[in-house]
Image (tube, rainbow, N blue to C red):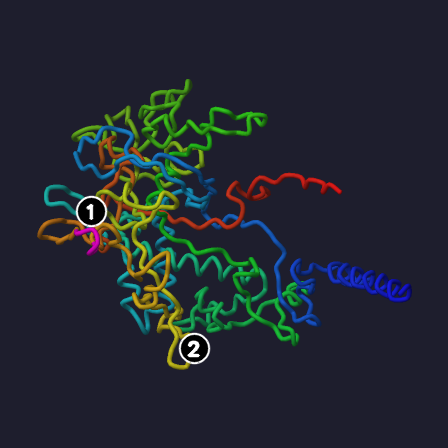
Amino acid sequence: MRRLTSLSLILGTGVLMSMSACKNGGLFGKKKESSSATGWAYNDPKMGGFSVAKAKDQFTGPGLVFVQGGTFAMGATEQDVMGDWNNIPRRITVSSFYIDENEVSNINYREYLYWLNRMYYESFPDVYRNALPDTLVWRSELAYNEPLVEYYFRHPAYNNYPVVGVSWKQATDYAKWRSNRVNEKLLMDAGLLSKADIMNQADDNTFDSKAYMAGLYEGTPGKMTKSAKKQFANPDGSPRGAQFEDGIMLPNYRLPTEAEWEYAALGYIGQNPNPSKKEGKRGEELIMNKQIYSWGTNNSGLRDIRRGNWQGQFLANFKRGSGDNMGMAGGLNDKASIPAPVLSYFPNTFGIYNMSGNVSEWVNDVYRPLTTIDGDDFNYFRGNKFQTVYQNAEKEFEKDSLGMLKMRDVTDEESASRLNYQKGDVINYLDGDSLSLVEYGYGITSLVNDKSRVVKGGSWNDRAYWLSPGSRRFMQEDMATNTVGFRCAMDRVGSPEGNKFKTGNTFKKQRQKR
């Protein structure tokens, strides 16, 4: 019996030492990260080769600024002078995200067109032609705007002016293209792709992030460091492509939702009434201040109230009154008769320019009059039409003729047994479907349909009423005007407070009582 007890102690000690060895990468070996669930080592070909990237923060993509999410009162902060009843205030929460510092400019969009022309024009010229902005939006029956038709989009003087004449569909396609170019550059920087590939791409042999991760775009590897070669190796030692789990690529650029756009425009983060560290930087009552414009509650008017050279200057580009787009000679009020450069006027406390004025902007949402009171109070969005990756008869993924990974709509049959949704297309959910007994007869009883998209913010040709972030209008997704542009957004992964912050309140472990 004494022998058995001693043997048990030895075996128990051995198990503990083995577990410790698993955690630390061996009794005498180099310390390696391992699973807290199984003890198996990560990134070790001898133990299966399960690859795990070291936890790291999401870096800010080109052109973006970080917007820390939170709760706010979405909707009108002024009287509904139009009588639309389409922006009734409602409190919701928005997750942290990223948004463009400024509107997409003419030179940004011309870069996009240049790429489309180089990749597709020989085989698919309509791809390039369909992406061209409609410069005829500057024409009017009783105005001489032909110089703007000819020069606004193309002349270098207007390089940094916001692109207009772009439909919602065109803006969405631009965001997809931008996602691919940014991720392609990140893979080149990591040595996973060679820059020589750029000149060899055309038609269906172009880089698409999803197609690359599905193994449908290989490319030529670049020069990788030793650590990168080790990280991107299969258990047998052969090289592999990067996956999203490796943390190299960024989430997709996209149009912001209406809730995100409005929240970013209000910029509450810089108006916190309790800024000291002792008080924890809390400002729960801030949403009750009813901010009118994007530059904050400290200045509820349209002019700068700070003392100095800027005192009395207009903070945004808008139409002051009938026939007054910029003021009188020698004293121009906003110094712009049409859209101004994208980094003009007063940025809000998130550091975002022209959320009030300059050009109105497309957002992702399908328009409904009562959109602010008929849905979720967390990350509200109307416009979901769920998709999944297309698979052929052999259960293989495929690319389309432009090199994009093929997607298909989710069917109602696939969704019927789910708890969280029962249809693939839920654009009309509770407002236009058979359950709500509401029908939008476009052109007969309403100008609203499933192609009506929300437009936010006032423009250079709008009165001050439309500069309030809570105001909203709509336009058909395939239409364009000279007052509407767009900017992109991106999902945030990780801590909602930003990099180097933890998610959730972390407390010290309590010692267990014997």
- In this picture, residue 478 sits left or right of residue 390: left
The single residue placed furthest to the left in the displayed view is 444
- Along the polypeptide, which appears first: circle 2 or circle 1? 1
- Quick one: 151 or 14, which is closer to the camera? 14
In this view, which residue lies farthest toward the right?
A: 2
Name the quarter where the C terminus is drawn: top right
Q: Element under label 1?
A: helix
Residue 435 on the magenta span = yes
Q: Would you place residue 113 above or below residue 487 in this image?
A: below
Q: Which residues are magenta?
A: 433-437
- Nearer to us of marks 2 and 1 is 2
The percent position of residue 116, horizontal first and vertical second, equals 36, 64
Residue 211 on the magenta span: no
| Neighbour tally class for label 2: few under 14, some 14-19, many 20 plus, Cα within 10 Å | few
Which amino acid lies under the numbered mark 1 shown in the image of this protein?
Answer: Trp
Q: Quadrant of residue 315?
A: top left
Q: Is residue 3 left or right of residue 189?
A: right
Q: Residue at x 35, y 47 (%)?
A: 257
Q: Quadrant of the N terminus?
A: bottom right
Q: Which residue is mark 2?
A: 396
Distance CA(mark 2)–CA(mark 1): 47 Å
Establish if 162 lies above or below 25: above
- Which residue in the structure is indicated by mark 1? 138
Q: Along the horizontal axis of the image, is 200 left or right of 31? A: left
